[in-house]
Image (cartoon, rainbow, N blue to C red):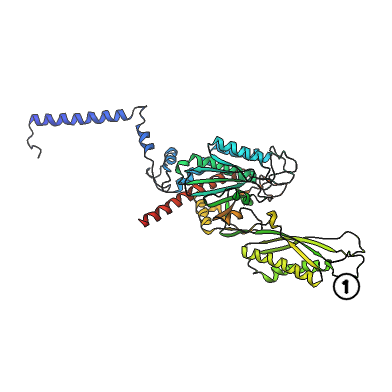
């Protein structure tokens, strides 16, 4: 139908009336939308979160998106920098920073040795109860296995150790150890605080989790091999990957460091006893063996295991650290000599090669000097740790997650060190990665190495560590969900 061309009075009057009606409706709608108490704009904004990445914006050029809009925009159905930003924002809330420091200080004041972490464990359980996080207790006497998420696969674990050291604290400050001869000189108080901080973040974001996060609070890392006991009690049940963090005085505060492959050495100890017949006083020395000479030859020959039998690019250590024979009677040849030490290596192959050769060398040298020898590696006392070798895929996950969280300048590839950690036992069961968070701050005096009575930390690392734990766990589940769905889609 075409509009009429004639300009009659009635036609013009009709057009004017329609125009006035349209304008009146428009003005009425605008007025109703602008009333002070109308919330329809905010309701529509919050009901439909944006899925844009942090590098995209619907705001005009030069304008910043409001903070509330940015927070609600991080839906994380597709992982983006906004998801990492939100995790870090939660960790750095003033009330959360105050809380996490308080947790660490309470634990620091009451250090407990291996398998004696009763008060520490009780504190952890109270905090988990406050967060409405379920857990299993006890594991390995004082350990805890807490659960956040859907309760369904996939399962990823994050671990913190709880025990202190038999060291008298020399740092004078308000929260100095109240237990004489005991100190958190290796940062395990901080480890627990950061994992509880991650628990708080993950609980706040539980609706984002595409599976289940297992929080492992482990006793007895220092002297009791708590990792093996935790696994025996089911700490890794259904777990397909695990991560752990340790403070480092070599990295600036808040900087994350790790590497793919060997990171920490396997560690073991040995004790040899070389003996000969007779009592050393009433026998003809020239007709009997000399255990002291045999021990001396053994000590020298052991040095050749590393210097002559090992790849120079594969770092290894064999060190004799004590030798004891008889008493102080200078007129008597001893009938037995004891000596021992430690061994370290970065691969299981090298580690077991050293074990075998230590025993062979000592027994052979004892025989040369007409003596007999036994070698004990203390395998029954759980003092032997395997090397900590980071899984390539888990390391790459840590690297990309950390860079997204704190930026590329705050992630560093570190060199392997000869220290040992019982987290390596977990790595022999499931893919694992161990990493560091820096606490070095010369202004505060946070420069001393672990196991020093002067050891202290820069607590500004705590919220960053909590956020790193949370991001690593949440993103792992997110990426696994995408991987699983992709496989199912291809099978269809």
**Outermost front residue:** 277
x and y percentages locating residue 56 in the rendered image: 40, 47
| Left/right of residue 16 with respect to residue 350 in the rendered view | left
x and y percentages locating residue 83 in the rendered image: 46, 45
* Above or below for 490 versus 295: above
Quadrant in which the N terminus is drawn: top left
How many labels, in total? 1
Q: In the depicted view, which residue is nearer to us: 380 or 450?
A: 380
Quadrant in which the C terminus is drawn: bottom left
x and y percentages locating residue 443 in the rendered image: 66, 45
Question: Which quarter of the picture shows residue 309?
Answer: bottom right
| Left/right of residue 196 with respect to residue 167 in the rendered view | left
Q: Is residue 89 visible?
A: no
Residue, disc 1: 287
Q: Residues within 10 Å of mark 1 (few under 14, many from 20)?
A: few
Residue at 6% x, 35% y is 6
Q: Is residue 335 visible?
A: yes
Residue at 26% x, 28% y is 28
| Left/right of residue 82 with respect to residue 7 in the rendered view | right
In the structure shown, which secondary structural element does the residue marked by tag 1 occupy?
helix
Q: In the depicted view, which residue is nearer to us: 140 or 109?
A: 140
Q: In the depicted view, which residue is nearer to us: 214 or 442?
A: 214
Q: In the depicted view, which residue is nearer to us: 200 or 285?
A: 285
């Amino acid at each position: 139908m075409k509009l009429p061309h004639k300009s009659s009075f009635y036609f013009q009057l009709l057009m004017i009336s329609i125009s006035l009606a349209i304008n009146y409706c428009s003005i009425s709608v605008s007025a109703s939308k602008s009333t002070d108490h109308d919330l329809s704009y905010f309701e529509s904004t919050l009901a439909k979160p944006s899925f844009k990445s942090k590098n995209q914006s619907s705001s005009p050029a030069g304008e910043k998106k409001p903070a509330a809009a940015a927070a609600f925009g991080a839906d994380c159905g597709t992982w983006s920098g906004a998801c990492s930003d939100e995790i870090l924002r939660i960790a750095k809330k003033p009330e959360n920073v105050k809380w996490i420091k308080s947790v660490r200080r309470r634990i620091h004041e009451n250090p407990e040795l291996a398998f004696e972490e009763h008060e520490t464990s009780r504190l952890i359980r109270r905090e988990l109860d406050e967060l409405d996080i379920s857990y299993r207790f006890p594991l390995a006497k004082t350990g805890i296995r807490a659960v956040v998420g859907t309760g369904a696969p996939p399962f990823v674990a994050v671990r913190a150790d709880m025990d202190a050291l038999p060291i008298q604290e020399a740092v004078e400050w308000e929260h100095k150890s109240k237990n004489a001869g005991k100190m958190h000189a290796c940062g395990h108080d901080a480890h627990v605080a950061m994992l509880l901080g991650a628990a708080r973040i993950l609980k706040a974001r539980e609706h984002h989790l595409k599976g289940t996060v297992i929080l492992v609070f482990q006793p007895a890392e220092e002297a009791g091999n708590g990792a093996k006991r935790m696994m025996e009690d089911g700490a890794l049940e259904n777990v397909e990957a695990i991560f752990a963090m340790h403070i480092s005085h070599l990295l600036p505060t808040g900087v994350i460091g790790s590497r793919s492959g060997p990171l920490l050495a396997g560690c073991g100890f040995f004790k040899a006893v070389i003996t000969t017949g007779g009592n050393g006083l009433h026998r003809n020395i020239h007709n009997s063996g000399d255990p002291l000479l045999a021990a001396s030859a053994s000590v020298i020959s052991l040095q050749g295991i590393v210097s002559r039998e090992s790849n120079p690019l594969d770092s290894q250590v064999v060190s004799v650290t004590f030798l004891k024979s008889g008493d102080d009677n200078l007129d008597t040849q001893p009938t037995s000599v004891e000596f021992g030490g430690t061994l370290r290596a970065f691969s299981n192959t090298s580690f077991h090669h050293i074990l075998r050769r230590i025993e062979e060398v000592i027994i052979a040298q004892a025989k040369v000097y007409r003596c007999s020898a036994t070698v004990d590696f203390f395998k029954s006392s759980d003092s032997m740790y395997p090397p900590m070798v980071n899984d390539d895929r888990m390391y790459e996950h840590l690297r990309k997650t950390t860079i997204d969280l704190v930026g590329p300048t705050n992630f560093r590839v570190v060199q392997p060190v000869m220290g040992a950690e019982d987290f390596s036992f977990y790595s022999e069961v499931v893919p694992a990665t161990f990493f560091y968070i820096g606490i070095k701050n010369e202004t505060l005096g946070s420069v001393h190495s672990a196991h020093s009575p002067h050891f202290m930390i820069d607590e500004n690392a705590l919220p960053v560590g909590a956020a790193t734990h949370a991001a690593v766990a949440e993103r792992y589940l997110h990426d696994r969900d995408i991987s699983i769905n992709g496989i199912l889609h291809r099978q269809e």
